[in-house]
Image (spheres, coloured by chain):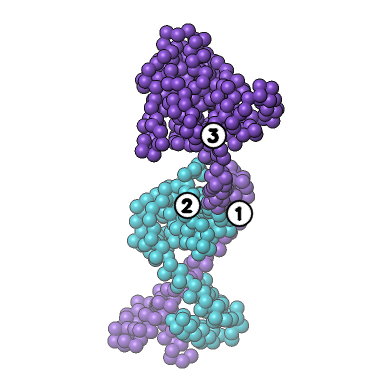
Chain colours: A cyan, B purple
Amino acid sequence: MRKEVKSSVPADNEIILGILNDSKEILNRLYQTYFPMVLQLVLNNNGNEDDAKDVFQESVIVLYNKVKSGNFELNSKLKTFIYSVCRRLWLKRLNAQSRNVRNIEDFSEFIPVEDDMEQHEEKDRQFTMMEHALKQLGEPCKTIIEDYYLQNRSMQEISEKFGYTNADNAKTQKYKCLQRLKKIFFQS
Amino acid sequence: MNKDTEITNLIDAYLKGELSSSELSDFQQKRSSDPAFDLNVVEHENLVGHLTEYGKRVRLSSEMNSIHDEIDIEALKREVKPELPIVYRLWNKYRVSTAIAATVAMIAVFGTLFSTGYFSEVISTNYTQMRRELNSIKRSQNALIKNINGKPGRGPVNPGQFGGTGFALSSNGYVVTNYHVIKDADSVYVQNSQGEAFKVKQIYIDPTYDIAVLQIIDPLFKLASLPYTFKKSAADVGQGVYTIGFPRDDQVYGEGYVSSRNGFAGDTVAYQVSIPVNPGNSGGPLLDGKGNVIGIINGKQKFADGAAFAIKSSYILASIDAIPQDSLVNKLALGRRNMLTGLSRQDQIKKLEPYIFMVKVY
């Protein structure tokens, strides 16, 4: 254990609340506060800054999913949680690259996060499946689906954007696209 | 629009919470009464759920990327990793290999040293054994002296390559000297003060105590009975002692005192003696004033004044005891009676002269 990176740390419950409210401000502070720690971990264990970025962002996703699933109970410091998740993720990557991982150099205490990692892996699998399915779907279906379900655009806007004569045509198109997506997603 | 499209739109509206309360109750009604419709709703909800998750994650990632782009990574890197120069990183990476390489190198070095017999020279380099290398000049002088004297030496004409001193253990031709004097010898001769040489054979060697017992082969060889005895107990520090040896081709007398109970580096087998000794003195007797043999000279310390060493007489006696008496042609009987006590030193030396030999090794 060597020197820890110091910075003004926002309170843990402040961050949790911010996550629940989708606060960009909190995400920014979370990032600024904890990224250096992860960068230090990865750089000192055979990684570069891009590895650190990937690992850290994945850990934030784990945290968001955990908080938003509703039954979140923080039984350690947030810092420890993030560090533990990143450590776990980085070890896994090192293992995948079959590098020497007998003695990872640690900079903070850590807790076991196996359960969280399992849940995360399941979510990650679904995410990849969806990403894959949308890719397979092709245009214009992908954009229509994304606009309607993810951007929450109205059918009116979408039909104008795609040049449909009326919203009903757009709705028919959206229906077809959704049926195809359903087929691809559930069959893969 | 066909019916399926209607249903999809209805479910979408339901999921987005756009249904009025009457539409909602109709919707619930339909769900409970029509299982196929209900399945459709569940499936749809599931898919949209996954879609939303996907969307959130994509959005989160893009937000984080934009935050990340604003961070000065290089500055941060310097901050978290200022004390790690390349050497340290290389060391971290290769220390296991380095350790293995170092081990192999050490094994190779010590293996080579061991196999070439480096470690068998156990005696420290500070310690010199007092056997003499006879060089060619001395050899010619020796031959010259013999010619002038006209003495019919019974030994070979060619003198030895190494020399030391030995002294009689008994009147019937047993002689003791240092093991290091006669080791690696092809053949060994002893020569008395008269210049007569006799071939000897090794009876017993003890490399640990650096003792060798020789026997003169000539069955007719006979000395008068030994004037000295062997001291069984330890000598006292400060006791005056003297030795007679062959650092050159004549007997040389040296006088000193026991300066320590133990020998080189605390070796309990030997005494430290302050006495002038030179190469060739090895194997000579160390006698006290009363004519008791208290030890046998075997070396001195380099770079130190007056630090010679002598193996204690008790180890000579132990070596003699270790010789199986059955294997001896003649009985080895040590002198019982001391004939030197009370004599002046000059007379003692005169008496001792015939019992002390130069040992020549070929």
> What residue is rendered at 48% in x and 90% in y?
B1
Checking the image for residue B70, the label placed there is 1
**Label 1, label 2: how many angstroms apart (C-alpha)?**
33 Å
Viewer-nearest residue: A176 or B109: B109
Residue B188 screen position, x and y as percent? 55, 35
Q: For residue B106, say whether it is visible.
A: no
A26 up-or-down from B45: above or below: above
Q: CA distance from mark 3 to mark 2?
A: 72 Å
Q: Residues within 10 Å of mark 1 (few under 14, many from 20)?
A: few
Density class for disc 3 (Cα within 10 Å; few <14, some 14-19, many ≥20) is some
Where is residue B281 drawn, in percent x and y?
Answer: 55, 23
What's under tag 2, amino acid-wise?
Asn
Position above or below: B291 against B42: above
Which kind of residue does numbered mark 1 sit on?
A: Glu
Residue B28 appears in the figure:
yes
Mark 3 vs mark 1: same chain?
A: yes
> Which chain is mark 3 on?
B
Which residue is tagged 2? Answer: A103
In this rendered view, identify the residue nearer to me: A21 or B187. Answer: B187
Image location (x, y in percent) of residue B247: 59, 22
Could you tell me which secondary element the residue under label 3 belongs to?
strand
Q: Numbered disc 2: what chain? A: A
**Mark 3 to mark 1 CA distance (whole Å):** 100 Å
* Residue with the mark numbered 3: B199
Give the letter of the chain under mark 1.
B
Amino acid carrying label 3: it is Lys
Q: Nearer the viewer, mark 3 or mark 2?
A: 3
Q: Nearer the viewer, mark 1 or mark 2?
A: 2
Residue shown at 48%/36% (left/top)? B202
